[in-house]
Amino acid sequence: MSRRCRYRIGEPLKSLATRPPARVRSVALTGSLLLIGCLSPGPPRYTIGSWPTTVPAYSPTSGEARLHDAAEFGAAAEAQRRLTTSDLTIDKDKRGREVAVYVLKAGEALYSSVVVRFCGVVDADEVNARAEQILAFNGLRDPSRIPTGARIKIPMELLDDELFDRATPIRRPVPGRALRRDALHVILDAGHGGTDPGTTVHSWSEDEIAYDVMVRLKALLQGRGVQVHPLVSDADTGDKPQNGNPIRQNRNEYVNVTPPYRMEDSRVALNLRVYLVDDIYRRLRRSGVRDEDIILISLHLDHLHPSVDGVMVYYPDAAERPDSYSPAGSVYASYDESRVSSIAYARRENELTESYSYEFATKVISASRSLRVPVHQYQPIRRFVYRSGRKWTPGIIHYSRVRTSVLIEAANLANGGDFRRIRSKDFRQRIADAIARAVL
């Protein structure tokens, strides 16, 4: 079966029938030939224009291997794709290689206006590393002394895939939700918990803040007739919002599987959440609940580069989802929900999930803005970010079959403004109000 593959320079060519996989070193157009330089000898050549269904590729054993779906082969797309943003122009460096160029405006900084905006990284270490690469590429040393109007050149391989035309999110028609609110079902999650508090800043821990927002949102939804299915619970605080400064930390938190799992291993806690989501989803579908009336919302807080602030919403990327999900370990045989052998994913269902989830993410951002909850300046809705050079999507939604699945990063605890706001119970209530408005 053919698959759509996306590659960046240096990534393995998983479709190439070589052992070990060849790695792309360079991509160049010469006349009607696309030359792909690999670390293995003899770069393969592909004719541009009328693509056959399969094309020959170099193999060290047979001299000729075959690639699936050559028209969608990632390296060819890499050479032909187009930028979808007018904020960048294309130029060439001294060696004749194409580079993207951004003209720095007054008041802009390299970290937020270039790296975060165009490179798809948000974690502090990743942003700083990309900034150093771009500074060196431009012959610059001090990012604080770059003048307004400077032309910042960005190597093409550092750009976020979301900036190119081939990365356009899948769009499918999204049916309206049930008019009766008691027909709506929301699966709620608060990230981390137990021995894993997540990010902690000045005694404020991510898991306690996320759980507080969750119980506030749960109360709002239930008060309006929505059926709520929480994935986690706190044996000490229950469903009571916390108004302390800071919120008191505890480790008495559980994943609501059968029997309940006290969160002592963060990996197991995440995997059990995935199984629990799928179990709830299957039960609701069997009882006749429509796909469009089931929503998964996972609440988190980030610790990113301090230049980043505001709400961000992640949604699943259909192209990156695996064929199945089946974590190894005997522990999963101890819980009713995880005794299934695996969770399987179908391509069409993945595409529908991407489409429905994106549509709901836009509602979350719109509702946040209407209630004066800050949102990320450049790209508040994302399928992924890059970590260690690889695309990363949060696992709870990456493996969810729920048609509408989002993970909401309510604030960046490394940003001074976000951290000041999130400590206010009124602001946490406003975040819950915004999400409830998106649901209803």
Image (cartoon, rainbow, N blue to C red):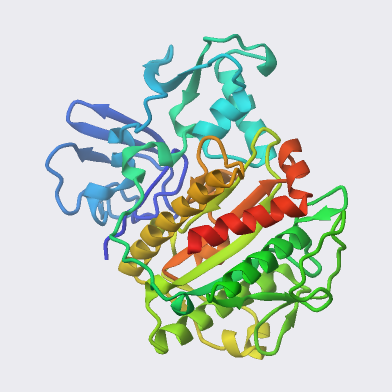
Question: Which residue is at the front of the view, 22 or 176?
Answer: 176
Q: Quadrant of the N terminus?
A: bottom left
Residue 72 located left or right of residue 413: left
100 is higher (above) or lower (below) than 208: above
**Residue name at image x 64 percent, y 80 percent:** 329
Q: Quadrant of residue 264?
A: bottom right
Residue 378, image x, y percentages: 51, 35
Question: Which residue is at the front of the view, 327 or 414?
Answer: 414
Q: Quadrant of residue 9?
A: top left
325 is higher (above) or lower (below) than 366: below
Q: Is residue 440 visible?
A: yes
Residue 248 located left or right of residue 76: right
119 is higher (above) or lower (below) than 203: above
Task: Count up the numbered dots.
Answer: 0
**Residue name at image x 87 percent, y 54 percent:** 245
Residue 306, image x, y percentages: 71, 35
Outermost residue on the left side: it is 50
Q: Quadrant of residue 333?
A: bottom right
Residue 163, image x, y percentages: 40, 36
Question: Which residue is at the front of the view, 164 or 157?
Answer: 164
**Residue name at image x 57 percent, y 63 percent:** 395
Residue 139, image x, y percentages: 59, 13
201 is higher (above) or lower (below) than 38: below
Question: Which residue is at the front of the view, 233 or 428?
Answer: 428
**Residue name at image x 69 percent, y 61 percent:** 213
Q: Is residue 43 visible?
A: no
